[in-house]
Image (cartoon, rainbow, N blue to C red):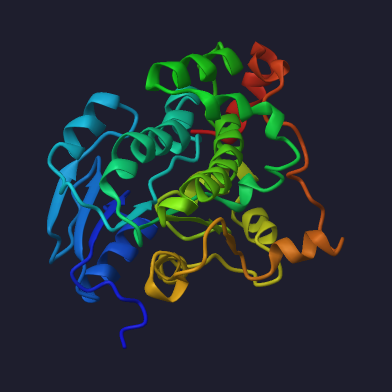
Amino acid sequence: MELLSYRDKVCVVTGAASGIGKAVSQQLVELGAKVYGLDRNEAAIEGLAGFIATDLSSKESIDAAFAQLPQAIDCFFGVAGLSGAKTGYWVTFTVNFIANKYITETYLEPRMAPGSSIAYVTSCGGLMWEKWSREYKKIMGCKTWEEMVAFMKKVSPRDGVGVMAYTLSKRAMNYYTALKAVDYAAKGIRVNALLPGSTDTGMKQEFEKMAGGQEKLLKENGAIGRLATPEEMAAPLLFLNSGMAQFVSGLMLIADMGHNGEKVLGRSKNQLDVPAALGIYNTRFFQNMLKKHTF
């Protein structure tokens, strides 16, 4: 019995050119899956069934990509994301949240049969999502791309520093994972999320800048004292969409080597228990403060 059961399955991976997306794509190819990679940059991976250059901040680019993908999709891996250290608020929130919601409801729902599955990569930075749901809950009811963009611009009229969009978008994705797991249960479609701790990907330098240096970033990652590798994140991500998780849905799988446990036990300060959508964040004064932690 193939426990992972990926052979001949049609798998779509966003962010396939680097980091966790590349690692999971490579492993899926080795497991015999038909892998379609989506990314702005070319994915240098042998054995892909297809690669489509895609800008997830653009509705038109997403539409063009899915016009080239199979009409039946077995597994979706929503890996692509932005830290906000190099991008503005609107692009960061769009790629991290709006694109995933749009893809799921416009393309995955009609193309997925019972037994199919979705796994998003969100973040431990999106924890406390239950407590602060009032900040983003209304966007869940938005039916179109344009309605979601309007909500985003209401939260942040100024297209400011993207780091504030990171936390809000990841919290929203965790909530959305729970919402879709409930909505799709009767359809037999599973929806889960992987919440990685700090990982050694192409965004490493960005997170170091945001944390105030490499030493502080490692400290923020808990007692393990190092960053995870993309392969260490690809493995639990593969599990979530695999045959080993046939009755698992709505799971927020935290992969941070116990660091969140340190916070729960009171051994480490929880810096995430703060709002992410205050009006003050749009002021010029606060934006200038944030720029110290960006490129």
Q: Is residue 34 above or below residue 12?
A: below
Q: Residue at x 38, y 36 (%)?
A: 105
Q: Quadrant of residue 171?
A: top right
- Foreground of the two, 182 or 213: 182
Q: Residue at x 32, y 34 (%)?
A: 106
Q: Is residue 231 above or below residue 135?
A: below
Q: Residue at x 35, y 62 (%)?
A: 115
- Foreground of the two, 212 or 71: 71
Name the side, left or right, on which 198 lies relative to 270: left
Q: Position of residue 96 (x, y in %)?
A: 46, 38
Q: Residue furthest front?
A: 186
Name the side, left or right, on which 259 lies relative to 91: right
Q: Position of residue 145 (x, y in %)?
A: 38, 22
Q: Position of residue 217 (x, y in %)?
A: 63, 55
Q: Is residue 156 above or below residue 168?
A: above
Q: Quadrant of residue 229?
A: bottom left
Name the side, left or right, on which 93 lies relative to 217: left
Q: Residue furthest bottom?
A: 1
If the image is split into quadrants, where does the N terminus sit?
bottom left
Q: Quadrant of residue 7?
A: bottom left
